[in-house]
Image (cartoon, grey):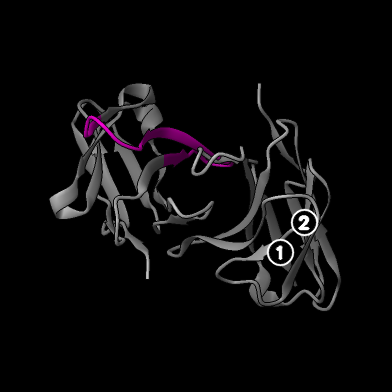
Amino acid sequence: AQSVTQPDIHITVSEGASLELRCNYSYGATPYLFWYVQSPGQGLQLLLKYFSGDTLVQGIKGFEAEFKRSQSSFNLRKPSVHWSDAAEYFCAVGLNTGNQFYFGTGTSLTVIP
Amino acid sequence: DVKVTQSSRYLVKRTGEKVFLECVQDMDHENMFWYRQDPGLGLRLIYFSYDVKMKEKGDIPEGYSVSREKKERFSLILESASTNQTSMYLCASSPGQPNEKLFFGSGTQLSVL
């Protein structure tokens, strides 16, 4: 069965520090990969996505993610975190056989001054 | 700008009531989805629809039904609300092409007392 794992439930970083959020997936082929962000009281907003090609993907708000096929991972990174980045982050997998998406359980990010 | 609108931001209902959650999108999207979001569980797919009057069960359809009479509107129905259906409900839509990103509404926080 397909699954998406975000092993970190909650992460706290200092403003200005670097950030890496982990995501692993279980799927028989290379899926479509997404990172979404949910700010408090808001719906989810797409940060970036990977379909094919260059394995390092740039997104909005200075985020990037790297697809590593050998590790079935799609980790999200940001070199320098801002206080406004405090939010919940979801990794998602889209199957190329249809229109279904599977989400991880989310990682809550706290940014301290 | 694209928009997915959920009719209520907060809703309080009593056990046994019939509950309607409404979602409207203005992007002429083929696909529409209903998710519920619970802490530690991420987003779980309840139902999705890929065309008018068409619906498919997601991972947790029990206790829910849906209706899509018009392309822009996708309704989630709780036939007899129960306390374990207290949750955040998120509606999303996407174009007909496989695995285009999801556009989310702001969510409806439903409390069943």
Q: Quadrant of the N terminus of chain B?
A: top right
Q: Which residue carries the number 2 mark?
A: B11
Please state if B10 lies on the left or on the right of A107 as rendered. right
Circle 2/circle 1 CB separation < 8 Å: yes
Task: Classify A1 as above or below B22.
Answer: below
Q: Amino acid at mark 1?
A: Ser
Q: Find numbered disc 1 in the image and state the secondary structure of the residue it sits on.
A: strand
Q: Position of residue A54 (x, y in %)?
A: 22, 29
Within the image, what quadrant is residue A34 found in?
A: top left
Q: In the rendering, at what x and y percent does residue B82 appear?
A: 73, 77
The circle drawn on residue B111 is 1
Can residue A42 be seen in this snapshot? Answer: no
Indicate the secondary structure of the residue bearing disc 2: strand
Subunit of label 2 = B
Note whether residue B91 is visible. yes
Q: Residues within 10 Å of mark 2 (few under 14, many from 20)?
A: some
